[in-house]
Image: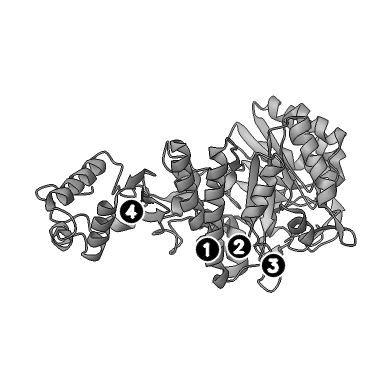
Amino acid sequence: MGLGMDRMETIRTDWNRDIHKFKFEELHILLDINSGSVHIIDEATWDLLEALEKLDGNISLAIRELHHRYPREELWAIVSQLKSLSEQELLFTSDSWAWRRADKFSDDRVKSLCLHVSHDCNMRCGYCFAGDGSFGGDKSLMSGDVGEAAIDFLLENSRRKHLEVDFFGGEPLLNFDVVEHLTEYGIREAEEKGKIIRFTLTTNCLLLDERVMDYLDKYSMQVILSLDGRRETNDRVRMVGMGKSSYDIIVPKILDLTQSRGYDNYYVRGTYTRKNMDFSDDVFHLMDLGLEHISLEPVVAPPEEFGFTREDIPKLEKEYEILTLGLLERLKGGEEVDFFHFNIDFSGGPCIPRIVRGCSAGVGYFAVDPSGDLYPCHQFVGDKNYWMGDVFSGLQKHKLQEEFQQAHIYNKPLCKGCWARFYCSGGCHANASAYMGSLDEPYDIACSLQKKRIECGIYYQLKKDFL
């Protein structure tokens, strides 16, 4: 493993595939991919690693190439430090999981459901993958009977004690009576079976009123609140009726919940598009409103409407850098935010059972449409090629489930050697299917943006620790 010592003539030939180094502002950062260890290195160490990569790991040749820039003693001291980190399994570690069958890492039983309690919506957002909320079908609401059958399906097909249910749509608050009924039904039935269901509700906030807020308080339900940022950004895409602004309706409701009531179990979730590639200003705007838990996602849509092209990537990467430095500047002034994509934990390294296949779509996580049909996730709903059964008779497409079971990072050619594999888990299956035509080939634009977010998140956490 790692470096040999007697003058350390060479290092493992594949060492460079197990590290990732990058520069951000004043820092040279080195990531050990398999352990998750992060190191701040100096320029001499950076140059030595560059020379080693060029010279196939030959240490003597690398030092000979650099001795005119750095004293030999300094370079050999760096090699010794690298060896020490290697012996501590903090650097040049091998991927000890790659040779194992990845399907051993996951429970193929159900652990979470996305309940589409409403296939209707009271907004008309231009980029919505669900269209007008109907997912390409008829407008409909889930009945209490179908919802009960879905929760029974979850409880009967799970081994875990802790389970999850997300109320989704369309707009789930259009069917809030059923949301209330299913929450109470789920709590009662889970308790009888010695289990616990954690509930989440995703809403556009138009119907967020006292009754809903009281209910969220009562059951400590996590809520995802949709708002894209500045008024002009939000209202360009997120419209009510005939082009009416939604910002002025939504923002007071969000502030009532999160500030007047002090509700903290939330994320404000926005989407940025090709029409607002200065999206850092939208994050800062949300912070200026006093919001503390923020997620901003790139749209996945055709470029002729709202989506991105490969030519947009450099500008978007630069915008993430602007966002990173802006968040750190605000942090110096005492203003901290929980920005979802920068939440990187250095303490324990990558969690292999979690990262092998990410969200477990089609394996342990399913979406349920209003009729009770099962799909791998909410983005596949309505696509009959991905119909997997229903909550009454159970899973029917076991071969399709096996395809999702095998769509993990060690079976994806572009993922198994990628430095970011333990952070992105191979990307989104639905995006891969829609834009690359295969579950095994990740959507390339999303990959590029994810890698940049990870680098920014690592830098942000390192600098945060110094402030």
**Most foreground residue, 137 or 189:** 137
Instruction: Check disc 2 and report the residue beneath it.
Output: 431
The answer to whether the residue labelled 2 contacts the one labelled 1, judged by CB atoms less than 8 Å apart, is: yes
How many angstroms separate mark 2 from mark 1 (CA)? 8 Å
For the residues carrying marks 1 and 3, which lies nearer the camera in this image?
3
For the residues carrying marks 4 and 1, which lies nearer the camera in this image?
4
Q: Residue furthest left?
A: 6
**Local secondary structure at mark 2:** helix
Residue 442: assigned label = 1
**Local secondary structure at mark 4:** helix
Q: Residue furthest bottom?
A: 304
Instruction: Check disc 4 and report the residue beneath it.
Output: 18
Q: Earlier in the sequence, mark 3 or mark 2?
A: 3
Q: Earlier in the sequence, mark 4 or mark 3?
A: 4
**Corner quadrant of residue 309:** bottom right
Within-10-Å neighbours for mark 4: few <14, some 14–19, many 20+: some
Within-10-Å neighbours for mark 2: few <14, some 14–19, many 20+: many
Instruction: Check disc 3 and report the residue beneath it.
Output: 306
Q: Amino acid at mark 1?
A: Pro
Q: Residue at x 76, y 41 (%)?
A: 149
